């Protein structure tokens, strides 16, 4: 399992290839030398949209600042992954969430889940994103020509997370 | 002994403060009572009482305003999260 909160970008393909490869990823282990029981990898990448959530400004947003709660963020993400592992047959998972200044088109978040079959991978990936949206302490501030705005939480995100409750 | 209080995002900006340490007031037995104590400072601190759906974490775990607090705790107040 890999959880990272970082300012730098991530490489989706490299992160997916590293699932199930253990800690030695990128140190001479070629693909296929890791676990052979992974039959499915589901991934989600969230990016900065030019059309923001807050503004109706046709010019859209020029950038975004991601704030987080160091210490709690990593703990909250680890708990979400742990809960996903309790619900589905997850072999490996990676969450990378960027913080700091981001421009439209840039990556914000990666969730990638490896399992034996697609059902577990799809479900666990969607669950992790839905819980991340409502439980991990990140906050977005959009920059627009009309000024900066903190993004409001969406009720639709609460509903998406609530559908996983028992 | 005291408590470490953290503020994030729009609340941090409204208060003009990201963190402080205070002696835990005797009446602040839970996070909500601590919130009320801080909001009673008036001025910008009223934002603590006015923030819609204020969230609280005690020792880095999201909880509710009726959660007990005690000396040595790290207590964070923030608006609903918007990551992802």
Image (cartoon, helix red, strand yellow):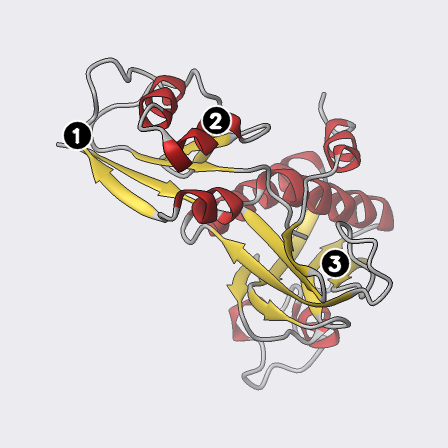
Task: Where is residue A31? Give x, y as percent.
Answer: 71, 78
Task: Where is residue A5? Give x, y as percent.
Answer: 52, 61
Q: CA distance from mark 2 to mark 3?
A: 38 Å
As drawn, the residue found furthest toward the left would be B1
Label 1 secondary element: loop
Instruction: Tell me which residue sits at (46%, 44%) in the image.
Output: B14
How many numbered tags mark residues here?
3
Q: Which residue is mark 1?
A: B23
Q: Which residue is mark 2?
A: B63
Q: Residue B1's quadrant in the figure?
A: top left
Foreground disc of the pair 1, 2: 1
**A124 horizontally vs B57: left or right:** right
Foreground disc of the pair 1, 3: 1
Task: Where is residue A156? Give x, y as percent.
Answer: 80, 35
Per the rendering, the mark at residue A67 is none
Q: Residue A45's quadrant in the figure?
A: bottom right
Label 3 secondary element: loop
Q: Name the subunit of mark 2.
A: B
Task: Where is residue A66? Give x, y as percent.
Answer: 58, 59
Placement of A74 over or under A36, stated as above or below: above
Per the rendering, the mark at residue A37 is 3
Label 2 secondary element: strand
Foreground disc of the pair 2, 3: 2
């Amino acid at each position: 399992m890999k959880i990272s909160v970082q300012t730098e970008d991530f490489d989706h393909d490299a992160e997916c290839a590293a699932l199930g490869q253990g800690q030695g990823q990128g140190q001479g282990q070629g693909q296929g030398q890791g676990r052979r029981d992974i039959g499915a990898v589901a991934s989600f990448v969230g990016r900065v949209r030019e059309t923001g959530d807050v503004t109706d400004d046709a010019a859209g947003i020029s950038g975004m600042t991601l704030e987080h709660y160091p210490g709690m963020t990593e703990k909250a993400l680890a708990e979400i992954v742990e809960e996903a592992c309790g619900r589905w047959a997850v072999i490996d998972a990676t969450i990378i969430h960027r913080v700091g200044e981001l421009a439209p088109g840039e990556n914000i978040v990666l969730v990638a889940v490896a399992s034996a079959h697609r059902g577990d991978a799809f479900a666990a990936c969607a669950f992790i994103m839905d819980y991340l949206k409502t439980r991990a302490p990140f906050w977005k501030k959009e920059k627009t020509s009309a000024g900066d705005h903190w993004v409001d939480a969406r009720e639709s995100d609460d509903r998406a997370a609530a559908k996983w409750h028992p | 002994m005291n408590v470490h209080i953290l503020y994030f995002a729009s609340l941090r900006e409204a208060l003009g403060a990201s963190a402080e340490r205070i002696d835990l007031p005797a009446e602040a037995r839970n996070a909500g009572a601590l919130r009320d104590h801080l909001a009673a400072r008036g001025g910008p601190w009223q934002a603590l009482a006015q923030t819609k759906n204020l969230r609280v974490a005690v020792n880095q775990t999201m909880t509710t305003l009726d959660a007990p607090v005690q000396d040595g705790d790290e207590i964070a107040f923030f608006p609903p999260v918007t990551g992802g």
